[in-house]
Image: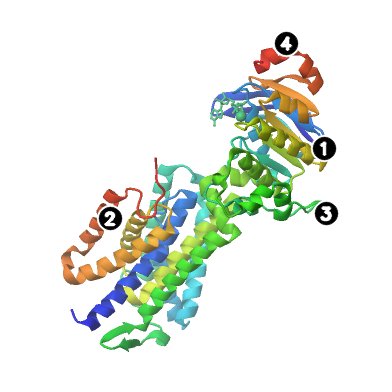
Amino acid sequence: MLELQNVHSYYGTSHILQGVSFSVPSKKCVALLGRNGAGKSTTIHTIAGLLKPRRGKIQFKERQLNNLLPHQISCLGIGFVPQGRRIFPSLTIRENLTMAARKNLIDRNNNWDLERVYELFPVLKEREKNMGTELSGGQQQMLAIGRALMTNPSFLLMDEPSEGLAPVIIDQVGDIVVKLKQEGLSILMVEQNISLACKVADEILIMNKGTIVWQGSPDELMKNNEIQHKYLGV
Amino acid sequence: MSLSIFSVQLLTGLAYGMLYFMIAAGLTIILGVMNIVNLAHGTLFLLGSYMAFTFMNQQFSFWIALLLSVAVTAVIGIIIEKLFIRQIYGKELEQVLLTFGLAFVIADTAKWIWGTEPQTMAVPALLDSSISIGPMVFPFYRLFVVLIGCLLALLLWYFESKTRIGAIIRAGVDDRAMVSALGINVGVVFTGVFAFGAGLAALSGVLGGPLIGMYTGMESDILVTSLIVVVIGGLGSWKGSFIGAILIGLIETFGKIWFPSLSMLIVFLLMVVVLIIRPQGLFGREVA
Ligand SMILES: Nc1ncnc2c1ncn2[C@@H]1O[C@H](COP(=O)(O)OP(=O)(O)OP(=O)(O)O)[C@@H](O)[C@H]1O
Ligand SMILES: [Mg+2]
């Protein structure tokens, strides 16, 4: 569904992504792990169009994304749940959701709208008139996921959804990710939390210094202490 | 000062305030949303009033001339944004040079088309009378301008806080990249905002025609006044501009009567006082 081939990205003159290649199959969840500064967010930003790759190919459903703008990429069905949530502080919870609303033109029977997001996250409905940033970290994460769902994506980019959350809340986030996968979404999830990643992902990628250095199943990673130690600092 | 003069002056001050509000609202919204100080904004005011003047000479009514000028100026705004401003988002020096340069080009073009003779515009017949309450006299046209200014404030409030576009624009001020990653074409939003601001400048220019007339150099006078309004109100806040514009309209009008030679100085003084007490302006966002 999504495929990266030898992608190189730069911030100014610093060469961050140094030939990244991987693919995410349809209706699967792939987790991208790696230490701080490994280039995980840079990978997500490059896919979302927020950073232009200098070399390589990014393909989504037969479409080349390299030269598209962020809004065009979003409109192809790629939802973005950023690191740090990036909730709009000037907007109420309800507005944070409705501003992103876009009808599902491909599958009309599977349309995400305000009602359905509120069904998935009842707490957002209870507090819909509050400002988005008045929510707790976990609730803000739900809002960020709900906001991405409002764009009716077929693919979700999630950047460290468990960051800064209490263990119980992390479990909830995991349940949501599993649920979304069951709904037919494909997901690329960046994580630092190995157990969460192994619980929800079908496949694990490990990134180090801007390249993918290991790839395997969650089981393989759990058994491989050397890799965990070397690249994830466990 | 007699009550009748006072009432007329009060209304005049308010009417001028509303004209300042109309032009400053566009300036401050463009600044808040797109991060650009449009130094050509005053010339859009000038263009609006001159175009209405020409349309009226072609036997169009004041009202048709008003609509046409606002529409044409909005289209000019679209062209300016798409052709020039778009190239220099985020580059402050370029923005100053470009919008300053545009201001010169447009003002000189206006001089070339309409000459340097001051012109006047008649008050539309429909509003060319006044209402008296006791000893107080209120000219209709000024009441009308005040009404339009208040309606505009109401419209902006509704638009900003009750519509999806308003939410998108506020979100864009918070985090532009995030808005675009949610599938919204921020470029189109920017063009729309710029065109809207240009249209408001023209509205101010046309409505100001019967009060101020048209003269060479008017564009810089109005630009300076509206920049002061924007600073007093707080950068990016149209609500602040509403209050700031009314204050300046009143102070300028009464200042001209009581201290004829000092009226502009008083306006600057007001700005200084506001900035000392609230550096971010009346409604400005606190900056760390
Ligand atoms: N806007 C930027 N400008 C310049 N350099 C940047 C920028 N953003 C990130 N970098 C650099 O790029 C490298 C990769 O950063 P990236 O954000 O992709 O890491 P990450 O794997 O997401 O780490 P974390 O787990 O901390 O989020 C880092 O060295 C970082 O300093
Ligand atoms: Mg990151």
Q: Is residue B222 left or right of residue A141?
A: left
Q: Is residue A170 visible?
A: yes
Question: Where is mark 1, residue-wise?
Answer: A27
Cα–Cα gap, marks 2 and 1: 60 Å
- Name the residue type under label 4: Glu
Chain ID, mark 1: A
Question: Where is mark 2, residue-wise?
Answer: B271
User: Pointer 1 and pointer 3: residues touching (CB < 8 Å)?
Assistant: no
Assess disc 3: are there few (<14), some (14-19) or many (≥20) residues with their C-alpha within 10 Å of its C-alpha.
Answer: few
Quadrant housing the N terminus of chain A:
top right
Q: Is residue B78 visible?
A: no
Assess disc 4: are there few (<14), some (14-19) or many (≥20) residues with their C-alpha within 10 Å of its C-alpha.
Answer: few
Say if labels 2 and 1 share a chain.
no
- Name the residue type under label 2: Met
Cα–Cα gap, marks 4 and 1: 30 Å
Question: Where is mark 3, residue-wise?
Answer: A109
Chain ID, mark 2: B
Question: Where is mark 4, residue-wise?
Answer: A226
B66 or A152, which lies in front? A152
Q: Of the residues under marks 4 and 1, which one precedes in the sequence?
A: 1
- Name the residue type under label 3: Asn
Cα–Cα gap, marks 3 and 4: 47 Å
User: Pointer 4 and pointer 1: residues touching (CB < 8 Å)?
Assistant: no
Cα–Cα gap, marks 1 and 3: 18 Å
Whether A155 is drawn above or below B139: the answer is above
